[in-house]
Amino acid sequence: MATRTILIVEDDKFARVFLKDCLAELQCRIEEAVDGDDALAKISQVIPDLVLLDLVMPKKSGLEVLKAVRDAAPTPPILVVSSLDTDKLIQQALSAGANGYISKPFAPIEVLTAVRRELEALK
Amino acid sequence: MSDYWLSDVEHRVLGPIGLEVLQDLAEAGKLTQIRSVSRDGRTFHPVDKFPEVVAAIGPRTPADTARSQMDALERVLKYLTAIRRQSAHEVFRVAPGAPLDQYRGAFFSIIKRFYPDRLPPETTPELRRACQEVFLRLAALITEVEKSRR
């Protein structure tokens, strides 16, 4: 099977490193974007197999990235990873096309399980 | 209607969200550091130009946060020293053979206080570093427990 690519969109370096560590055992190629504009630029070059998306970022918010990605085609699965985990915001993100919502703080296995599930669904 | 963008002191943006979502977040205590607001996602203005947003997020007290930084740093460093010497069940205060769910429940309740994204932007670099160290130690411990149960 070809190596899968996961794009981590997160402005906090510490959180990016932690997410990367959580996914290490999947042996996927990990790309990183540090803000919303960076994410859209990277996705326009190479469409990843999965996106992990923070909601609060400089330049463009996660919700704007989510909309822009969903308006384009083809469009990868997107898992939102955010500490803003109120019901209404989760509902808004899911309605906007997110495939799942992981609340921060998370246990490594939560991320691993959600990512595995999405990658399995691609097969 | 979703038509507010909120920006914090680090120029991180959330939006577009409706007033209802904004109120929901504020009531959950997740919108205390908002510095400016936009109606189009491009031009931002001080929060006080939007009385409906001020009413939703309530009074802000950054000075209170700043005053407590030193006390907090001292407490976090003391906690860090303690958990570096302890095993998982001691840190999470559960029985050594407790179910994984109990460990995870304890992990989540403790970690909320230290997770970098949850720290106010005014947090000093020293306090932020100390919280990250605590977070890494707790994450390593829960990972260790999860691996041992697979």
Image (tube, coloured by chain):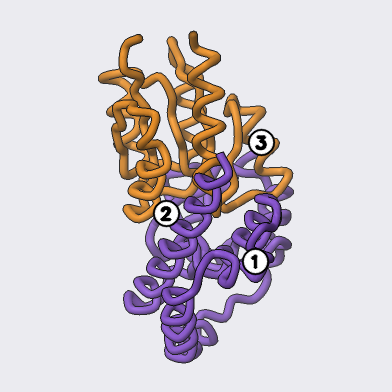
Q: Chain of mark 3?
A: A
Q: Is residue B47 above or below residue A18?
A: below
Q: Quadrant of the C terminus of chain B?
A: top right
Residue B11 picture location, percent across and down: 39, 57
Q: Quadrant of the N terminus of chain B?
A: top right
Disc 2 residue type? Answer: Arg
The residue that label 2 is drawn on is B12
Tell whether label 2 touches label 3 (CB within 8 Å). Answer: no
Chain ID, mark 2: B
Left or right of B58 on screen, residue B10 = left
**Chain B painted colour:** purple
**Position in image of residue A9 (x %, y %):** 38, 39
What mark, if any, has residue A42 been given in the picture?
none
Residue at mark 1: B54
Q: Quadrant of residue A72?
A: top left
Which residue corresponds to mark 3? Answer: A92
Q: In terms of sequence position, does the residue under pointer 1 or pointer 2 come before the other?
A: 2
Per the image, label 3 sits on a secondary structure element best described as: helix
Q: CA distance from mark 3 to mark 2?
A: 19 Å
Q: Which chain is drawn using orange?
A: A
Asked if residue A58 is positioned above or below residue B10 in the image, the reply reads above
| Circle 1 residues within 10 Å: few <14, some 14–19, many ≥20 | some
Q: Position of residue A73 (x, y in %)?
A: 44, 11
Secondary structure type for disc 2? strand
**Dot 3 and dot 2 within a common chain:** no
Separation of residues labelled 1 and 2 (CA atoms): 19 Å
